[in-house]
Amino acid sequence: MVEQYCTACHQTNLITRSSGYTANGWKTLTRTMIDLSTQPEVEQHIFNYLAENYSPNTLRSPTLISGETNISFTQWHTPTLGQRSRDPIEAADGSIWWAGQRANLIGRINPNTGEMKEYILPENSMPHTVTTDRHGNIWYTGNKNGSVGKLDIKTEKITEFKMPNKEAKDPHSAIFDDKGILWFTLQHSNMIGRLNPNTGDIKLVTMNSPKSKPYGIKIDANGTPWVACNGRNCLVKVNPQTMELTDIMLPNEATRVRRLDIADDGMIWYVNSSQGRLGRYNPNNGEIKEWPSPSGSKSHPYAIAIVDNMVWYNESGMRPDALVKFNPINESFQSWAIPSDQVYAGIIRHMRPTLDGNLLIHQSSTNKVIRVNIQ
């Protein structure tokens, strides 16, 4: 029964590797994914089985470090069950947008009222992320149908831009530069793309080495895109005019980088996901320095964002996920367990600052969008 109802959306290892729950905990978690309340006997059989065989454990508990910063969490539960909400971003008007990848939608939250609205996308878009342009329109990457899409916030019309190369199958992460050009990665297609919204022109370049798996992407103060490699031990600098790619090799060949961010001083901060480390690359002199994450080599840091010169990231290999703050001045860590109705199911795949210096994260397993209020 568990296989019948659960593996339609995810593999069983999400159950076997979980931190475990009581029957009520499994009920709370499962009802964020699928509604079996009309079949109470089926529900009870499943919850009892899971509680007996996958009870609470501490095998993946994070190492939490206290400190001076205080935070609180504001949570929104997105409407459509099982959508695996992700990648929230704040628009200029203060609304919060997210991608509901599994349900083929993007959504908007009014954080003042809690009102939410979801927009169904063209078939098989399966959006991986959302971002905003200078006019307030919302853009998404069609991770399954090889497209980039735009939602006009005034007309609510969706315009699709298809990839010009049939090998470009999976647009992934995206960001606009100051000139209004959209830059995006295509992880498994091993490409980086550039879209001019005014003309619809798309240019694609292939990574310098096979299986580099370009993942996170950010733009520095000079308008230069930087890309994280999830398949090789590298960061990549992109020439914004020619799209020539320059690989910056990181010391350990086993390093894999999910995401990066760029500080005001130009330093490139990255998560060394495979080694459980936080890293910094100095583009001025080539210096690379890394720090072990508090929960160790299996903590799998994933998302990262710079807020007020502090580095924030999560340890996605832990249960619950740990939210970590690193102070570059004194090289100190502080961390917190990320709650979601006491269901610690993870995981954060992206985080971005708000305009007033807070942080937007998510918990895709329970369809949560979360604002971290930094005090």
Image (spheres, rainbow, N blue to C red):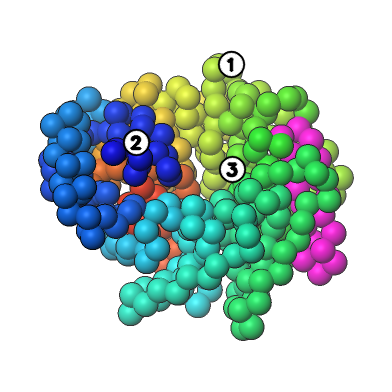
Tag of residue 253: 1
Quadrant, the N terminus: top left
Observer-nearest of 214 and 142:
142
- For the point 37% across and 77% down, the residue is 115
Observer-nearest of 112 and 266:
112
Specify the amino acid type for callout 2.
Answer: Glu
Is 264 placed left or right of 331 in the picture? right
Q: Which comes sooner in the sequence, label 2 or label 1?
A: 2
Mark 1 surroundings within 10 Å by alpha-carbon count, few (fewer than 14), some (14 through 19), many (20 or more): few
Observer-nearest of 288 and 236:
236
Specify the amino acid type for callout 3.
Answer: Gly
Q: Position of residue 180 (x, y in %)?
A: 73, 65
Q: Which comes sooner in the sequence, label 3 or label 2?
A: 2
Q: CA distance from mark 2 to mark 1?
A: 37 Å
Secondary element type, mark 2: helix
Q: Is residue 308 visible?
A: no
- For the point 62% across and 55% down, the residue is 124
Give the label, 3 or 2, closer to the camera.
2
Specify the amino acid type for callout 1.
Answer: Glu
Is 369 placed left or right of 259 in the picture? left
* Residue of label 3: 216
Magenta extent = 190-207
Say above or below: 324 vs 83.
Answer: above
Q: Position of residue 269 (x, y in %)?
A: 53, 38
Is 215 placed left or right of 56 in the picture? right
Q: Which comes sooner in the sequence, label 1 or label 3?
A: 3
Q: Quadrant of residue 188?
A: top right
Tag of residue 3: 2
Q: CA distance from mark 1 to mark 3?
A: 19 Å
Tag of residue 175: none
Say above or below: 132 vs 174.
Answer: below
- For the point 83% across and 51% down, the residue is 164
